Image (tube, helix red, strand yellow):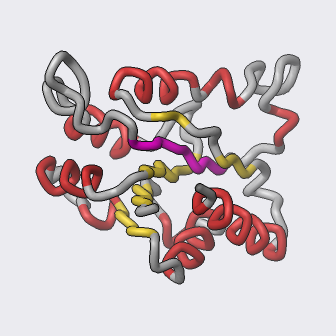
Amino acid sequence: MKILVNIAHPHIEQSRVNATWLRALEREHHVSINELYKEYPDEKIDVEREQELCLAHDRIVLQFPFYWYSSPPLLKKWQDEVLTYGWAYGAEGTKLHGKELMLAVSTGSEAGKYQAGGGNHFSMSELLKPFVATSNLIGTVYKPAFIYHGALSATDEAVEASARDYVAYISRP
């Protein structure tokens, strides 16, 4: 299975979790890495390049830190510009049908904050519903997200373990 990981972290050099995940992915021969903020520092997305990358892979992973209950702005822009009508959705928009879509999300807060009655009042499953809806619209098979909670308080050992778990998770058939 050919896996594309679109990493959307505006300051990955300052990240503990996403940077560690990136280093782990770099050792995997079956994974193509596409760092959106590195590729497009001017935020001018090469739509044709991005669509070709999507077509060349069986599984598309969107990796990002959870920002204001969603993704960083460049990933939203990527969705707006790459997943176009007539290509990704609409009567003729079937290019991604049958491919798999998966999320890899890190949060600063502990898991308990993301549940009914928790500090954020909603579960991650509820908060990630727009991505499920997008997957449904573009005809991809949505796979359960890999979520890492507590990035702000995690030990280095826990972050390293999460990287191993992440690579194993997205690599499963």
Left or right, residue 73 beside residue 168:
left
Q: Say if 90 sits above or below 131 in the image.
A: above
Q: Nearer the viewer, residue 165 or 41?
A: 165
Q: Residue at x 22, y 40 (%)?
A: 82
Q: Looking at the rendering, in which quadrant would you find the C terminus?
A: bottom right
Q: Nearer the viewer, residue 106 or 33?
A: 33
Q: Main secondary structure of the magenta part?
A: strand
Q: Nearer the viewer, residue 77 or 89?
A: 89
Q: Residue at x 74, y 25 (%)?
A: 123
Q: Residue at x 19, y 30 (%)?
A: 84
x, y percentage for residue 92?
Answer: 14, 23
x, y percentage for residue 71?
Answer: 48, 39
| Residue 8, image quadrant | bottom left
| Residue 87, image quadrant | top left
x, y percentage for residue 129?
Answer: 56, 22
Q: Residue at x 49, y 29 (%)?
A: 131
Q: Say if 82 sits above or below 137 in the image.
A: below
Total number of numbered discs in the rendering: 0
Left or right, residue 70 beside residue 168:
left
Left or right, residue 165 beside residue 5:
right
Residue 104 lies within the magenta run: yes
Left or right, residue 18 beside residue 133:
right
The span picked out in magenta is 99-106
x, y percentage for residue 147?
Answer: 69, 47
